Image (spheres, rainbow, N blue to C red):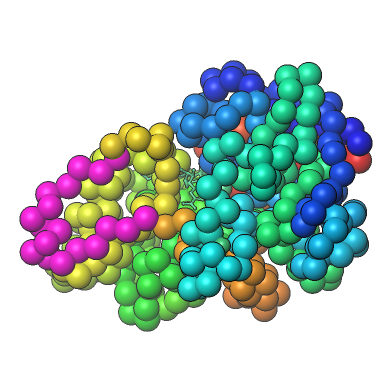
Amino acid sequence: MKTRAAVVHQPGKRIEIEELDLDGPRDGEVLIRYTHAGLCHSDLHIAYGNMEARMPMVLGHEGAGIVEEVGPGVTRVAPGDHVVCSFIPNCGTCRYCATGRQSLCDLGATIPEGHLLGGRFPITGPRGQYGAMSMIGAFSQYGVIHQNSAVKVDKDLSLDKAVLVGCAVPTGWGSAVYAANVAPGHTVAIYGSGGVGINAVQGARYAGAKNVVAIDPLENKREKAIELGATHAFATAEEAQQAITEMTSGQGADSAILTVGLMTPEVVAAGFNAIGKGGVVVVTGLNRMMQPTIQLPGSILTLFRKTLKGSLFGDCNPTYDIPKILDLYKAGDLKLDELITRTYILDEVNEGYDDLMAGRNVRGVIVHEH
Ligand SMILES: NC(=O)c1ccc[n+]([C@@H]2O[C@H](COP(=O)([O-])OP(=O)(O)OC[C@H]3O[C@@H](n4cnc5c(N)ncnc54)[C@H](O)[C@@H]3O)[C@@H](O)[C@H]2O)c1
Ligand SMILES: [Zn+2]
Ligand SMILES: [Zn+2]
């Protein structure tokens, strides 16, 4: 079948809309009619060449839609099911899935190429075989993904909001609740209040933090952070540092969560300085694969028993956490509607990313037309 999709051909060039050919679902695969796709900063990293990937690639890894058809052996979903895609697949049986660490599933290994199991590219077009970001490629009207990337959700949820639970929400929420292990009474510093960071704010608040300190140079992001649970918001790390020192009587924050768009040694150092003895820094934001983004005094790490850790998908287990987070949304314990600044049609994808880079959007969402 044919599908219109947003494709990056060459890093640094504008994203192009193309009509492509999509093969039907084979063993374990699912044909999805995408209804919505979120504009995450990680797609931009690929479009700008800040994250290495095989080209051409259909972008979009925060996706939701409806199952149209399933291939042989599919048991997790059936035609008509509503699904949120998980940007990390989960096989259920590798050592990481088997030990409750689905976001480390071995099947994530093909993300830079974007093909399905066995080197299969269901999307082809004028430039040959097209990869799909995170093996999802939600900036396309239709996609063929493995059932390991599809999580069935209740039909009474509207997918236009649930779509955010494919990346931004679990990544941010889990960075606070799981990776930083925020507990009642804690002081948490969150650097960057974009799509991911705003959900770290929500997670930290829900986990009972006393002080949720949001740091973002943009006023609209700071306002949103306060609206969704931050107790303090500052434009610079320096202002935040001073306030954290005061509010903790010199002890420092329990954790720092780094969710800026492009990770730098300065941001990592700011988080490292903001935490106190026994504190933890969670590095969630990304940069080029081999770019050194961490430069810290190791002896302070040792003597203050500080921890620095990376977090992928907020350390969430997609098959457990995606439905759980949606239940929190239904109960009013987590906001989704308030995160969406604007919607776009597929042809406006570049405009959507221009808006993100100009700082206008907390999250933009593509609404697909069929
Ligand atoms: N680890 C994961 O699993 C995972 C998943 C999704 C996204 N990401 C990464 O997380 C990062 C954030 O993604 P996003 O979609 O929320 O991006 P975004 O562009 O929506 O948000 C980034 C925010 O950081 C702010 N910012 C920039 N420089 C800053 C600084 N020095 N101090 C404080 N704030 C600063 C920006 O104003 C913006 O509000 C990206 O690097 C993305 O690739 C990681
Ligand atoms: Zn993402
Ligand atoms: Zn696995």
For the C terminus, give its image quadrant. top right
Q: Is residue 325 visible?
A: no
Q: Position of residue 232 (x, y in %)?
A: 37, 61
Query: In this image, 162 relative to 260: left or right?
Result: right
Query: In this image, 256 relative to 306: left or right?
Result: right
Residue range corresponding to the magenta coloring: 293-310
Please tell me which residue lies in front, 185 or 113: 113
Q: Residue at x 84, y 26 (%)?
A: 19
Query: In this image, 252 relative to 70: left or right?
Result: left
Q: Residue at x 8, y 64 (%)?
A: 303
Q: Is residue 155 visible?
A: yes
Query: Which residue ends up furthest to the front in the rendered image?
Result: 118
Q: Residue at x 20, y 42 (%)?
A: 295
Q: Does residue 271 lie above or below 122 as drawn?
A: below
Q: Does residue 349 lie above or below 111 as drawn?
A: above
Q: Position of residue 324 (x, y in %)?
A: 63, 74
For residue 245, what is the image quadrant? bottom left
Q: Position of residue 151 (x, y in %)?
A: 71, 64
